Image (cartoon, rainbow, N blue to C red):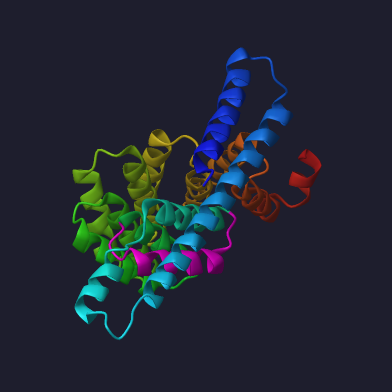
Amino acid sequence: MKFKEFKKELEKEIDIISAQIDSNKFDEKTIKNQILNLYKEIIDLNEFLVQSNLKIKELAKKVKSKKTDKSSFENFVQNMRISKVDLTTYIDKGWNFLVEEQYDDAIQVLEKASSLAPNDVKTLDLLGWAYINKERYDDAMIVFQKVLQIDPENSIAKNNLGFVCFKKGIYGEAIEHLTFVLKNSNDKVALMYANFYLGLIYMEREMFDDSVNFLKEAIKIGPNLLEAYYYLGLVYIKSGMEKKGINTLKDLIKKNRFSKWAQKSEMKLKEILGEKYEKEN
């Protein structure tokens, strides 16, 4: 097989791109295309390896004959577990589908990965998030509860379980999960989302001062969390501080006009200001 030669060629391409970037003498569009094409090749290769691995497992099953001892054969097949390459490929594909908001495809891929590696926490976390985006909250809850059985201190699962409870209207349990993260986690991303979700819960319950405090804390930890600015603007508007809310939404739009949260902000501003907003912009 020529895998060693292919590996060397791939490493060579990566080194060339790296050298171009380090030299600061490159066309940005060209280098981005090179990186994208290389990434696609690697994804295709990973998928090929996954399919090849599955075919090899099928060949192993065909080896079975009447003379084969059943228990020894089963042990042989069971020992051919999913490889890291296989699992990484499934996770990467699932993640890409999530980013592209193709949630049905993400669920299909991640459910397959979960069937091959039932206790892989990363796969379960992504699968649970895909379920959330399809509003399959009961399925998501089961997944995150399983993660916490495997890893009781998993702050991502705690956060997501808190969010699921919030969406199901189980506010007390939601607050309990999210407060646990605030008290016990040192992970900035986990703390950011715990504050954000608590901000949403208190907004829903019309406890606006608490909501503002949690959303501000989320923004302090993660200044690029655009959805936190959006909901902070809504909380200000709901609580009677309309001018402050409008300014918050306008600031969000300035940060990234092309994001979906900027678009939602524009819709809200048009709803509030009408023709005045159209003339200003």
From the viewer's perspective, is residue 99 above or below residue 105? Answer: above
Query: In this view of the protein, which residue sits in the foreground, 270 or 105?
Result: 105
Q: Residue furthest right?
A: 279
Q: Residue furthest bottom?
A: 66
Residue 60, how many percent across, how many down?
38, 70
Query: In this view of the protein, which residue sits in the foreground, 115 or 199?
Result: 115
Residue 128 seen by the camera: yes
Q: Number of callouts in the render?
A: 0
Residue drawn at x 44%, y 61% as measured from the top left: 53
Based on the displayed image, in which of its 4 quarters is residue 245 positioned? Answer: top right
Based on the displayed image, in which of its 4 quarters is residue 190 positioned? Answer: top left
Magenta span of residues: 100-120
Quarter that holds the C terminus: top right
From the viewer's perspective, is residue 230 above or below residue 163? Answer: above
Asked if the magenta segment contains residue 110, the reply would be yes
Residue 213, how many percent across, how many down?
36, 43
User: How would you classify the magenta stretch by its main secondary structure?
Assistant: helix
Based on the displayed image, in which of its 4 quarters is residue 57 positioned? Answer: bottom left
Residue 132 seen by the camera: no
* Left or right of 258 in this view: 19: left
Residue 80, how many percent across, how many down?
32, 63
* Left or right of 138 in this view: 148: left
Asked if the magenta segment contains residue 81, the reply would be no
Query: In this view of the protein, which residue sits in the foreground, 12 or 274?
Result: 12
